[in-house]
């Protein structure tokens, strides 16, 4: 059966996040990496998640319920928006790190990485934090339609080396490439 993704709640604080006890897969990435577009591609809907004309605006955490499976995809605010103050960026990091270290039902962290860009410091910080904390990582290269096959393969290899052997999935929200593979990986990780 094709899974369905439904927005169930939008929250702003760690306290509000505690109300959700089903298995969760977090979704994180630098702002403008294509996170909203990918949520829409997963949902096969055009406007479930708002595609940001102004990146870095959304500070909310969105809980998407996957049906019929019952787990949540937890869409975390995008990080690294250049125009945010240092204080705001610090707040983001604290919220996310606290969420990642305290969520008792967290099954994995899906980190979105732009396939066109060299690994960015903030991505390296987040993936290294996750690995040190023993969180299962599901790396995903976005906007694959913007790269040649050779460039994609090279970027995959580069990240696989950085992540100790975990090769990222490759997706495009625009063409739908890799979206079924991502669904399969998400469903697999909650059943482990
Ligand atoms: P977010 O800030 O991470 O939520 O990123 P958005 O989903 O808002 O996307 C940022 C920009 O990248 C938008 O202009 C999107 O249309 C574009 N974009 C997102 N995904 C893709 C993709 O797979 N292919 C292409 N070509 N553009 C994409």
Image (spheres, rainbow, N blue to C red):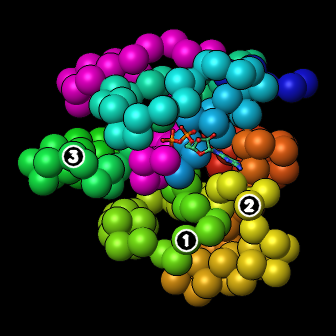
Callout 3: 10 Å neighbours few (<14), some, many (20+)? few
State the residue lying farthest toward the right.
1
- Residues rendered magenta in the picture: 6-32
CB of residue at label 2: within 8 Å of ligand 1? yes
- Residue 84's disc is 3
Relative to 72, is 16 on the left or the right?
A: left
- Distance from disc 3 to disc 1, alpha carbons, whole Å, reads 21 Å
Image quadrant of residue 140?
A: bottom right
Residue 36 in the image: x percent, y percent?
A: 56, 35
Whether residue 6 sits left or right of residue 12 in the image: it is: right
Asked whether the viewer can see residue 34, the reply is: yes
Q: Is residue 139 visible?
A: no
Q: Nearest the camera: 192 or 108?
A: 108
State the separation of the CA atoms marked 2 and 1.
Answer: 11 Å
Residue plotted at (61% across, 84% down): 158
Question: Quadrant for ligand 1?
Answer: top right
- Sooner in the amino-acid sequence: mark 2 or mark 1: 1
**Secondary structure beneath disc 2?**
helix
**What residue is disc 1 on?**
117
Mark nearer the N terminus (3 vs 2): 3
Q: Which mark is residue 69?
A: none
- Mark 3: which secondary structure? loop
Q: Is residue 87 above or below residue 9?
A: below
Mark 3 or mark 1: whose residue is earlier in sequence: 3
């Amino acid at each position: 059966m094709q899974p369905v993704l439904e927005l169930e709640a939008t929250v702003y604080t760690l306290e509000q996040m505690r109300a959700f006890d089903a298995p969760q897969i977090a979704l994180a990435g630098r702002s403008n990496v294509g996170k909203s577009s990918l949520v829409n591609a997963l949902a096969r809907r055009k406007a479930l998640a708002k595609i940001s004309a102004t990146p870095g605006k959304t500070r909310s955490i969105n809980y998407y319920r996957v049906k019929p499976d019952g787990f949540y995809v937890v869409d975390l605010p995008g990080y690294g928006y250049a125009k945010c103050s240092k204080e705001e960026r610090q707040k983001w990091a604290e919220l996310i790190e606290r969420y990642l270290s305290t969520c008792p039902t967290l099954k994995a962290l899906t980190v979105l990485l732009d396939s066109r860009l060299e690994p960015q410091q903030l991505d390296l910080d987040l993936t290294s934090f996750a690995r040190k904390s023993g969180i299962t990582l599901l790396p995903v290269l976005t906007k694959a339609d913007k790269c040649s096959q050779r460039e994609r393969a090279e970027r995959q290899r580069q990240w696989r080396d950085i992540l100790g052997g975990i090769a990222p999935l490759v997706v495009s929200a625009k063409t739908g490439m890799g979206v079924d593979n991502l669904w399969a990986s998400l469903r697999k990780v909650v059943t482990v």
